[in-house]
Amino acid sequence: MSETPESGGPSKTQIVLSGQQKALYEELASRDPSLAEMYLGAITLFHNKDIPDYLAFAAHGIRELIEKLPLYLGLVKPHKGLSLTERCRNFSFEFKRAKQRSISFTGSKFEGEIDPDLDRMLLKMAKFIEDFEEDYPARKEHMARVVRKLDPLPVSLPTAIERSIVEQFLEYKNYFQGAAHHMGTDDESFLAHLYRLERFLLDYLRPQTFTDQSELDALIRYGEADAE
């Protein structure tokens, strides 16, 4: 077990991290101190059993870590320019203008040839959808992009393996999101999910390497002998 700096708060509770937790804490701190604080804060809340609803608060902290991790690590770009509401409002204006000006609009539907006003609106629609899908991808696609950028190997993951990893990542997120919203959990389940999430993140943020070529050679020889 390893000690970590005291957490904040009036009681100055000192949390003792496991080796795995200390490794993840240090890795997060090296990437962005805010990520390490989110993680430590969640663990601190979990260990403060005297705090009412401590499990929900701790789960909320882990969920925030999962959601913010891609942005803080620069794996996804923050939304720039107009908000989604503003984009919808602008497109609504284009649609209404096309209805007023286009001779293709009969009062209840568009029909016949596409005139310049309708063509302009359709192009705006295509751009709106394209930008929306880029800036607001579906959850699985969003997670897939994160997994691809985290993957340390130079070759792409096979589709089936990538799908499995994404499902695993989403499972962790869904669990902690549910726990944060009081959808039923307990200390044992929380710790089990936390342990596996920590291992999952470390595998990508700090992939295991062989410091000595002889270590790698020995492992290969062991595998070859076992296969005979």
Image: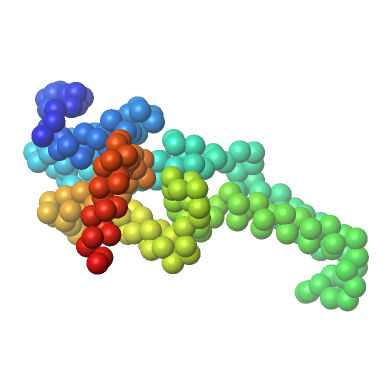
Q: Residue at x 17, y 24 (%)?
A: 6
Query: Which one is nearer the viewer's eye here, 38 or 183?
Result: 38
Which x, y percent locates residue 227? 26, 65
Against 18, is 94 above or below? below
Q: Is residue 175 visible?
A: no
Query: Which one is nearer the viewer's eye here, 196 or 217?
Result: 217
Query: Which one is nearer the viewer's eye here, 124 or 74?
Result: 74
Q: Is residue 188 visible?
A: yes
- Image quarter where the N terminus lies is top left
Is the image coloured rainbow, by chain, by secondary structure, or in one colour? rainbow
Which x, y percent locates residue 74? 49, 37
- Image quarter where the C terminus lies is bottom left
Q: Residue at x 50, y 52 (%)?
A: 155
Which x, y percent locates residue 181? 27, 53
Against 68, is 196 above or below? below
In this image, 53 relative to 80: left or right?
Answer: left
Against 73, is 169 above or below? below
Q: Residue at x 18, y 47 (%)?
A: 55
In this image, 131 relative to 205: left or right?
Answer: right
Residue placed furthest toward the left? 50
Which image quadrant for residue 214?
A: top left
Which image quadrant for residue 33?
A: top left
In this image, 49 relative to 198: left or right?
Answer: left
Which x, y percent locates residue 24? 27, 37
Against 186, is 38 above or below? above
